[in-house]
Image (cartoon, grey):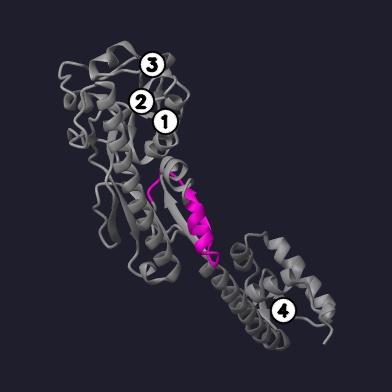
Amino acid sequence: MDLRQLPALNAIKAFEAAARHESFSRAADELYVTHGAVSHQIRALEEELGVKLFARDGKRVRLTDIGRRYAAQVRTALISLAEATREIRAGDRDRRLVVSMLSSFAARWVTPRIGRFIEANPQWDLELLSTNALTDFARDDVDCAIRFGYGNYPGLHAELLLEEVFFPACSPTFNGGNLPKTPTDLANVPLLRSDDELWRPWFDAAGLNDWPEPKRGVLYQDSSNLLQAAIDGQGVALTRRSLAMHEVAAGRLVRLFDIDGPSPWQYYFICTPQLMQTARVKAFRDWVFDEVGRFRLLFEKACTENAMRSSTDGAKTTGLDTLHVQLPAAQAER
């Protein structure tokens, strides 16, 4: 069989749609082309085949006997081609692992660690979807998500992944290395602001009950940008533990004091019950929970070392017995 003698695929598709509807106009609507384009494709196909596929009666068309037989065979062939294509795409999709998460969490928590997952799981083609929009599993092509919220996800498989807390941090070179030693020293330094990380509840935890929420200075909409500003020495930021600890461990940030403000939002691992049964989602779930275990150990070590340094410097410290306060739950879920 010489496949070079096959008619153009666009002409075949136009013919199949027109034959099924027995209407050039409805075929054009289905294919998102003009009535004239369908008519032209079918005339060209008839000329190439040397037969009439449609009988024209004014604006109405109907299949000829030859056209009807040809339409049945063409439809069978196209269905077979579509099914083969679907199987190929499905096979490729089974290798893809699409994970949705906050942009800041992807940049500051997942990216420094994701190499270990890729190395251990070369069979999966990982796609990290960094977005602040909630995933709609009924609509979006996403396998699983890490959400920063309250944990109420009806109909979904949801597991608490990581508790969040807030603490002040700054660059070790901030203010020439003369860092705040007590919470009241914050009155004399620029406090970096964000819509998500609010200072007012942390002030209460630190015993600064009459301190108002800062109103001056740059307001950062993205937590990752806020963190970068602190790393660059622009001021003291109230940071999320999940985003800041990698920078603290690397020495790019210094955690100030031992006073934490817990968050009303926590990180949750989310997917549909059906996707939870797939090998790719199970692999990512196991990896991310293992990484959280590593992260907790890192945090505990950093807290211990910070307490020891503070004791050596003669500064007042509460060691690992951190103070806590509930932040307001008015922010939208991520």
Quarter of the view holding residue 217: top left
Who comes first in sequence, dot 1 or dot 4? 4
Q: Residues in magenta?
A: 114-134
Is-magenta flag for residue 120? yes
Rate crowding at label 2 as few (under 14), some (14 to 19) or many (20 or more) other CA atoms within 10 Å.
many
* Mark 4 residue type: Phe
Q: Of the numbered discs in the image, which one, if any, rests on residue 54?
A: 4
Rate crowding at label 1 as few (under 14), some (14 to 19) or many (20 or more) other CA atoms within 10 Å.
many
CA gap between label 1 and label 3 equals: 15 Å
Disc 2, disc 3: CB below 8 Å?
Answer: no
CA gap between label 2 and label 4 equals: 74 Å
Q: Which of marks 3 and 4 is in front?
A: 3
Task: Name the spot of residue 55 as percent of width and height, x first.
Answer: 72, 79
The vertical placement of 234 against 169, above or below, is above
Q: Which of marks 2 and 3 is in front?
A: 2
* Mark 3 residue type: Gly
Disc 3: which residue: 217
Who comes first in sequence, dot 2 or dot 3? 3
Who comes first in sequence, dot 3 or dot 4? 4
Task: Name the spot of residue 83 as percent of width and height, x first.
Answer: 58, 78
Residue drawn where x is 35% and y is 44% of the image: 298
Disc 3, disc 4: CB below 8 Å?
Answer: no
Residue drawn where x is 35% and y is 41% of the image: 242
Residue drawn where x is 72% and y is 68% of the image: 10
Task: Name the spot of residue 134 as percent of width and height, x first.
Answer: 37, 49
Q: Which of marks 2 and 4 is in front?
A: 2
Disc 1: which residue: 227
Rate crowding at label 3 as few (under 14), some (14 to 19) or many (20 or more) other CA atoms within 10 Å.
few
CA gap between label 1 and label 4 equals: 68 Å
